[in-house]
Amino acid sequence: MKTKTLISILSAFAITCTAPAQDWAKAKLEKSPRHIEWVKVKHDNREVNCSIAYPEVKDKATAVVVIHEIFGLTDWVRSVTDQLAEAGYIAIAPDLLSGAAPGGGGSVELGQDGARGAIGKLPPDQITADLKAVVDYVSKLPACNGKVAVGGFCWGGGQTFRFATNDKDIKGAFSFYGAVPTDQAAIERIHCPVYGFYAENDARITSSVPDAQQKMKKAGKVYDPVTYKDAGHGFMRAGEAPDASPANKKARDDAWVRWRNLLKKL
């Protein structure tokens, strides 16, 4: 499958996501004792605005690049980086919509509705270049041990899997309810293990997992998907919201435990 076609599919799969107000996520960020800052990662003629969170540890840490949903770099995505930092990892979330807003702004200026409309117009090669630049940036930080993993949600989950086909240096890819690649040639380029996190009540995404398993097995790649019972699409965000359903809350909690355990093994 051509890259541009895959990008269109990723956007189409993500278009039905919903992201309600995230005041609770913003409140968590404001209470965090960890160091969180904004940085600009430059490459070619672009500047990618990124939010980075640092763990309170004495040794150098593994880094995780967090790829946002179709709604752009929201408070919830930034709160994920803080939670990863709490677990002992440097976590950086690039705003892949940097420069997409009128006047050169990004996700904040576009808002969630504007981000939904703009994200499908991002050039595939630009997305890859942005992510490569962020991986390079974070891997060279004095506090980083040189190991970098990538994880993403919904649209970002699909981009995580796609990025694994385009970067041989990342140590692991963690795709949360994102579209899967269907091009066998692209899958052959994957060098790291891919771990999937899927919702039972999300057939448009989860029904594609068996085909991905077959293609990954044929290519001799590691692909370990887990489907969370009774959970719905977006359970990582929905599961920690104040009005979370029991199924989404359990899926979110279980997935976090799994994610942390897998990161320890990188």
Image (cartoon, grey):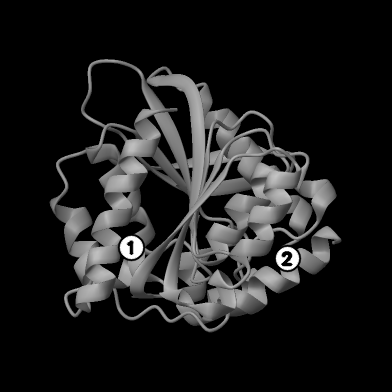
Of labels 1 and 2, earlier in sequence is: 2
Number of numbered markers: 2
Q: Nearer the viewer, residue 164 or 257?
A: 257
Residue closest to the eye, 85 or 220? 220
From mark 1 to mark 2, how far is it between C-alphas? 23 Å
Is 100 displayed left or right of 259 in the figure? Answer: right
The image position of residue 230, as x and y in percent, is 33, 76
| Secondary structure of residue under mark 1 | helix
Q: Which residue is mark 2?
A: 7
- How crowded pointer 2 is (Cα within 10 Å; few <14, some 14-19, many 20+) is rated as many
Instruction: Determine which quarter of the picture holds residue 22.
Output: bottom left
**Residue 137, x across and y down, in percent:** 55, 30
Q: Nearer the viewer, residue 176 or 213?
A: 213
Residue type at numbered disc 1: Trp
Residue 76 badge: 1
Q: Secondary structure at mark 2?
A: helix
Relative to 137, 22 lies left or right: left
Q: Nearer the viewer, mark 1 or mark 2?
A: 2
The residue at the point 17 percent across, 63 percent down is: 27
- Residue at point 28% right, 38% down? 85
Look at label 2 and name its amino acid.
Ile
Nearer-the-camera pick, 89 or 78:
89
83 relative position to 117: left or right: left
In which quarter of the view is residue 1 placed? bottom right
Look at the picture and state if 30 lies above or below 234.
above
Quadrant of the rendered image containing residue 170: top right
Residue 208's disc is none
- Locate residue 242 relative to residue 136 in the image: left or right: left
The residue depicted at 66 percent of the width and 69 percent of the height is 10
